[in-house]
Image (spheres, rainbow, N blue to C red):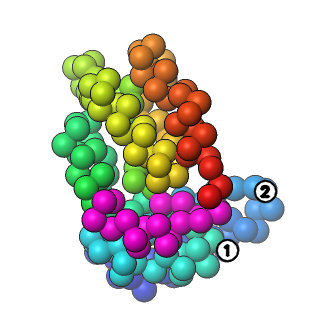
Amino acid sequence: DVSPAQLAYGYAAMGAALRQVGAPLVYSCSWAAYLGDNESAKPFDQMAAAGCQLWRNWRDVQCSWHSVGDIIEHWGAHTAALQAAAGPGRWNDPDMLMVGALDGRGAPCLTPAQERTQMAIWALVAAPLLMGNDARNVSAAARAVLLNPRAIAVSQDTM
């Protein structure tokens, strides 16, 4: 186990090292995911000061609607804290999009309706739209969800 103090030290040290690179980088931190379920108790300002620009908040997404739904429910329960933590250059990260992802047998992780729902929720919360799939095997329907210009416009809105 790693203590909150060790997380603060390690992520700040890495942030300082990345700033020395001198190139435009985005620093994604998993710091918040290690601090439990209570989003209002997480040190988002301290994470930003350490150089983190986006942070994984909670559990890893798995190849199932149950997993995606649990993340959506968690976000719903902690909307106020997560909304306050986000802003220009600061993003909460509920984990990857399972849109177009396949399980070990080659079956889609989500139904088409579930894929559209996940894309819509991730867009609404301005989450990083990171694909958790093998892009070589994405169906045309999943590709249409991932490239939906209206969902992307919502995600990229600066409000």
Residue 87, compared with residue 70, is above or below; it is: below
Q: Between residues 69 and 30, which one lies in front from this camera angle?
A: 69
Residue 37 location (% of width, % of height): 27, 70
Q: CA distance from mark 2 to mark 1?
A: 13 Å
Which tag, 2 or 1, sits closer to the chain's start?
Answer: 1
* Quarter occupied by the C terminus: bottom right
Q: Position of residue 50 (x, y in %)?
A: 59, 76
Which residue is tagged 2? 23
Q: Circle 2: is it few (<14), some (14-19), or many (20+) Cα within 10 Å?
A: few
Q: Is residue 44 visible?
A: yes
Task: Quadrant for the N terminus, please.
Answer: bottom left
Q: Secondary structure at mark 2?
A: loop
Which image quadrant for residue 15?
A: bottom right
Q: Is residue 2 left or right of residue 43?
A: left
Work out which residue is located at the far bottom of the displayed protein and give it. Answer: 5
Residue depicted at x 53% and y 75%: 47
Q: Residues within 10 Å of mark 1 (few under 14, many from 20)?
A: few
Circles 2 and 1, Cβ within 8 Å, touching? The answer is: no
Return the mark for residue 16: 1
Kind of residue at badge 2: Ala
Query: Which of the two residues, 73 or 14, is positioned nearer the viewer here?
Result: 73
Magenta segment range? 75-92
